[in-house]
Image: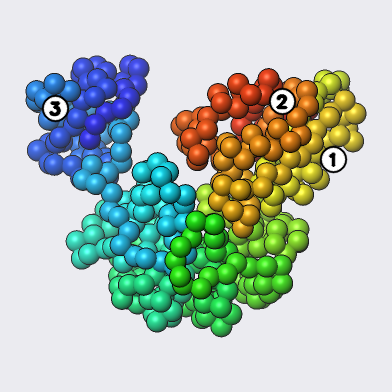
Amino acid sequence: MKISNVEENSLAQKIGLVIGDKILQVNGKKLRDIIDFSFEFAEEKIEILIEHADGSRESKSFDKDVDEELGVEFESAVFDGIKICKNHCVFCFVDMIAPNMRKTLSVKDDDYRLSFLYGNFITLTNLNDDDFKRIKNFHLSPLYISIHAMNPAVREKIMRTPLAAKIQTQLNKLDSAGVEYHTQIVLCPNLNDGDELNFTIEEILKRPNALSLAIVPVGVTKYRRDKFPLTQFDKAGALKVIQQVEKYQRQLRGKCGQTFIYLADEFYFLAELEMPPVEFYDDFPQIENGIGMTRNFIEEFHAENLQTTSYKLQAIDIICGTSIAKVFKKLVDEEIKKNPNLDARILPVENKFFGGGVNVSGLLTGGDIIDTLKKFDRPRDKILIPSTAIRFGENVFLDDVSLDDLQKIFPAHIIPISNGAEFRKVLSGN
């Protein structure tokens, strides 16, 4: 457990911990992850074994309040190594990234701890009996589970491992342990859609510990080399899925007042339909999975209460993926009606890096953004880019182009936008 940050005036600072120190044990217990640390550190009397950067070790003992935190950040949430996915799913996105990209982009985690801590989706094929016991004992709930299909044969075909066929048994173990879970399906034409999708939905609905079900369309990049036949949804196919799922959604809203089953925004983009109303998404249980993100953005945009009476003259270029361009255009047109001084235009970026089948803003690369801006070069005051395209905690895109690289080429204020409220503030000149 290597410390990457020590908070000012924290307990850690008071006892002399510094960046680079490693916490090896708490109260004599070795630590596998931050879950172990949190459990052991809940005691009032603490003894920690520290290894300093020079290799020397030191033990520190102190008293603390039960709810008092140490006040540090660690380099990783797991200290014994991330559990790597051993499946070979026919649609694995990691297998479809460009060659020679950063090693971190090629990590296929299937770790229940990251599922509990951060909402990462796991398949359950990686769990052994000890893992299930620990999930039960620590009540690590909710988890996020990639289902894909409840038909054992179909799931095994998709994930290409016999362990995938044990999904019913694995979910039974979680149910008996009282562990709740959110679920998802990566939907593939002619594989797990149609009657198979109906079967999967109905099986999940039988489980009281299931909290939600997200359905996302399969994505394919130009770097896919897998010979398994895989196609993407077109307009007609997306519309068929929407109509199929809407039957369940209407029944569930009438029966229990919740939608429970949520379709990814991409389905509505492909079908050229409006996003469902905000109440349709309940409390947005899978927004981190991209479910309802567009509707939430629109709601944030309209909810922002601006008191502006005079608008600044400004020229703004708005970078986005091709799928959401029409939504942005509609919002911008609304703002232009209020502000005649606003010169804003939408610049949808074709994803040449991953291929035209990838059209979401979060997978845009710096190189493609630069190429698009050069095509529409003009004097501009601001350039808005989606914050989801930037690596968390760093100002770098997936292709290692940085915001500084953009800034050197384009003399404008480059602003990453993360929500609808920020978008409207910038458009209004606030």
Does residue 418 appear to the left or right of 53 in the view shown? right
Please state the horizontal and vertical placement of residue 131, each as a whole percent of the image.
23, 60
Q: Give the mark, 2 or 1, whose residue is nearer the N terminus.
A: 1
Q: Quadrant of residue 423?
A: top right
**Disc ID at residue 333:** 1
Identity, as a three-letter code, of the amino acid under mark 3: Glu
Nearer the observer, 414 or 185: 414
Do residues under tags 3 and 1 come within 8 Å of each other at their CB atoms? no
Identity, as a three-letter code, of the amino acid under mark 1: Asp
Gap in Å between the C-alphas at discs 2 and 1?
A: 17 Å
Element carrying mark 2: strand
Mark 2 vs mark 1: in front: 2
- For the N terminus, the quadrant is top left
Gap in Å between the C-alphas at discs 3 and 2?
A: 48 Å
Q: Residue at label 3?
A: 51
Q: Residues within 10 Å of mark 2 (few under 14, many from 20)?
A: many
**Disc ID at residue 112:** none
Gap in Å between the C-alphas at discs 3 and 1?
A: 59 Å
Point 13% across, 42% down: residue? 30
Q: Say if residue 332 shows up in the picture.
A: yes
Q: Residue at label 2?
A: 382
Identity, as a three-letter code, of the amino acid under mark 2: Lys
Give the vertical position of 206 relative to 303 (above or below).
below
